[in-house]
Amino acid sequence: MANRFQIFSCLKAELPVLETGEFGLCTDTNELFIGSGDHGNIQILDVTTIGQLSNLTTQNKTNIVSAINEFQAKINENERNGNGTDLQGQASQPSPLKDLKLETLNASSKPEPTNTVAATSSSLSGSYLIELQRWGIRNDKTNSLETVDGINNAFLWAAENGYRNIVFPKGEYLISHSKSIRPQNNTHYDFGGSKMFMEPNNQENYSILSIGSADSTKKAHHIVISNGEFIGDRDEHDFSPGGTHEWGHCISLKGHCKFIQIRNCILRNAIGDGYIGEGNYDVWLYPTQSNFEVGAINKSSGNKESSAARIRTITPYDVSHVRVTNNGNKFMLTGNGYGALRGIHTDIFDLFFYDADGTFIQLQENKTWYEDIERPNGAKTMHIVLHQTTTTDIAFEVRAEPRPEFITIENCEVMNNRRIGIVGAGTRFFFIKDNLIHHNTGYVGAGIDIEDGYRTNQHIFIHGNRFYGHGINDVIFVGTYYVSVANNSFQSNCGGSGKYWSINDNHFIKAGCSITASDVVFANNTCNDSLYSFGSNNRGKNIIITSCIFHNSSIVMNQSEPYTINLSNSSFHNNSNKYRNGSISSFHHECIIKNITISGRETNGASIIAKEDSIIQDSTLINPIFNGSYFLKFINCIIKFPSLMTTVVSANEKEMVFDECDFTLSERFITFNSPDSKLKIINSKVKHTGTTLDFISLTAAKLFIVQNCSLFAPNALLGSFFSSSGFNRGYCLFKDNHFSALSSNVRALNFDWKLQTEPTVFVNNSYINISKPLLKVGDTHSKGPTDYRPQRYLTDGLEYYDTTISKPIFIKKEESGFYCRELSARNTTYRVGHLVLENGNVYECQIEGKSDNTKPSFSPIVGSTTKDGNILWVCKGISAIWGDANGNNV
């Protein structure tokens, strides 16, 4: 090996007092020192001027000449004395400085390898400071081809001579479009703050620095790129030849690239991407229907056996292919380039391996698509067993494709690239952290794009980055598995498809997510003025949204199955600046929304809309807006000052429930006008603070239940908790409720306009300082005078305390389920639902009007009708019979 003068290197804080004539290079500050005895360490220059000694000041030149001459004198003294040791007490080697004449060293001199002064530092670090003149490299932004050739020659020479830390003199380097900088393996390249410019050109593709190869036999690994600025020719590029010109990159990785780090760099102004890492698309098998049959393989013997629940390959496949052995004996079963698995109805398969003699050697069970399979030692062939029953139209691929893995981009600025900032196209274990990524837009536009490779993109970690200036997309994922996105700041969309995602502790500003991936946790994110969409009609299952804060933001959950996207432990804060529509929307199937807070009135849309039977539980809603088209179940919720909700007439067989809820309001909450649907308020508290009491107005309902509720109106001077207007055929039940107010002018309910086609049933209610409901013919009360005995909702044993006769009576015989003792009158107006008794049968008014002067002959057949003036009576059957405790009719 040629003689070398090696320089001690360390961090500046760790620099010791150097021996006289000993050099010391500070790798963190790029400063060079020399020991001077009594004067201590003298700074000679920083690395930006190494190789340009002619530019030093006279004083600096004097210092370095004096120090090196003193160093040379000590070497000569050792040689004269025959010590055979160097200045550090080690066995001496021939001196590389023996014949060096420092007085003639200037910028135009070109030292030979045997007498290089500024070549290296300590052999312990293996550092090499690139000699610009020696390799014909220019750092004044000229001679692009000679410069890139010189850099690559220097890299190769350094690698061959055992250097593992390469340092660039600071400058501006022009790189030819026809060649790339090609780092060597196992080396750290410190660009020392230099700028590497792509020469202006008209080509569609280029790469300033390139690692790896489309040749899968070539392997790049353990390379660090640091402290460089890589600048494309976007502003000066000639696009006139036509084409997309989207493939000019700052740094590119291709094929087998492992353990590559890009740190403290700037990647900007490329016509394509700041960084791109691509796998090689190496397919060696294309299994199809023609090589599959119904049947299984015995897991112990590896022999074929009958089974209608499995399909298997007819002829085994060779797994000793060079593409497998070249890829570390790993391969995977995949869909085509766009992820399509034709004819496949399962995610699970088994692989049976055999040696060259056909002897069964190993079973690998329950494998899945796009999972790395490791070929066992000695395996020659392989059978595939799919966990499905049909072979129809089967087609998939078997790949052994080298890809970038364990790639890190850290503390970089990636900006102003025309297509994408950072691209992963078939990569795994990709770490993108603590970068500033912005304004990558023009042709496509995005901060990060992980796709083109479909599910081969796995284990992607995007942490601690700041994104802005991308318009639509900050981060795009397509078919990406095992994703972690944490502690980033976004100003546009982050989303896509795939599986097994964690999106945590991010800050979204006027941004959002569009996520159709499955098995996603979206947690602890802060969202300002943003819109989020989760799931789709057939994608996006098992998504958990939790512990997030949404300011003037909205989320949409598209449930592909019931309860597959769930929202919990989050808060929504709205004000008058909000322009997005609503806070929470969930479509297609039921969902669970739990422990959320919504505060502030929406400026557009409803606070919550969801598929009927969705559950909102343990939540606080302040100033909410509800949409009467959506019938939901609220459980243990606090609802304060909601806006008026009017339900729709068209609602069919739906149910709106408020269970264990706590209401505070000052105006009407619901106008219920859905004749074929139900409203239930149970186990709840209602505090109405208005001076005019109005909680719920009932227009039409199939069923209305208020049970075990406490209702209080401390400020009301008039009005009622419940009222009815217009046509109503709803069956109503008020049971075990407590009504209270501070004025007798206030009524518990006002059903004066409720028509009696269905009864209102009152059971065990209490009334404090509030007017009780008026007894009304047709309603069912627990007590009252004889004339108001319950006439509907009659069952055997129904109890009624008759205040006229002062004793309890019971339904002794239900008969038609109707009771009436009122005979029809002539020239009298009757409303719909009124009951009359004729000849022991009960008749109900079906068409209201005025009765005739002459009583008609009432038909006794149940269900038949009788015309009476313009009234139409319907026969309901024999009247029910009341009895006392002794069984006597009363």
Image (cartoon, helix red, strand yellow):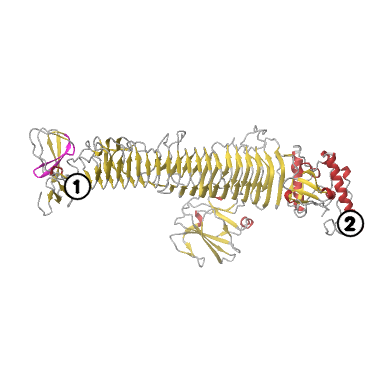
Whether residue 218 is visible here, answered yes or no, is no
Are there few (<14), some (14-19), or many (20+) residues within 10 Å of tag 1? Answer: some
What residue sits right under mark 1 in the picture?
Answer: 782
- Using the numbered discs, state the Cα–Cα distance from disc 2 to disc 1 in whole angstroms: 121 Å
Image location (x, y in percent) of residue 239? 64, 33
Image location (x, y in percent) of residue 553? 47, 39
Are there few (<14), some (14-19), or many (20+) residues within 10 Å of tag 2? Answer: some
Horizontal relation, residue 267 to residue 636: left or right: right
Q: Residue at x 91, y 58 (%)?
A: 81
Horizontal relation, residue 124 to residue 628: left or right: right
Secondary structure of residue under mark 2: helix
Point out which mark residue 658 bears. Answer: none
Q: Residue at x 90, y 59 (%)?
A: 82
Image location (x, y in percent) of residue 208? 69, 42
Mark nearer the N terminus (2 vs 1): 2
Task: Specify the amino acid type for callout 2.
Answer: Asn
Q: From the viewer's perspective, is the residue at label 2 or at label 1 nearer?
A: 1
Task: Specify the amino acid type for callout 1.
Answer: Ser
Compared with 761, 374 (above or below) is below
Boundaries of the magenta span: 832-848
What residue sits right under mark 2 in the picture?
Answer: 78
Q: Nearer the viewer, residue 406 or 253?
A: 406
Image location (x, y in percent) of residue 686? 32, 42
Image quadrant in which the N terminus is located: bottom right
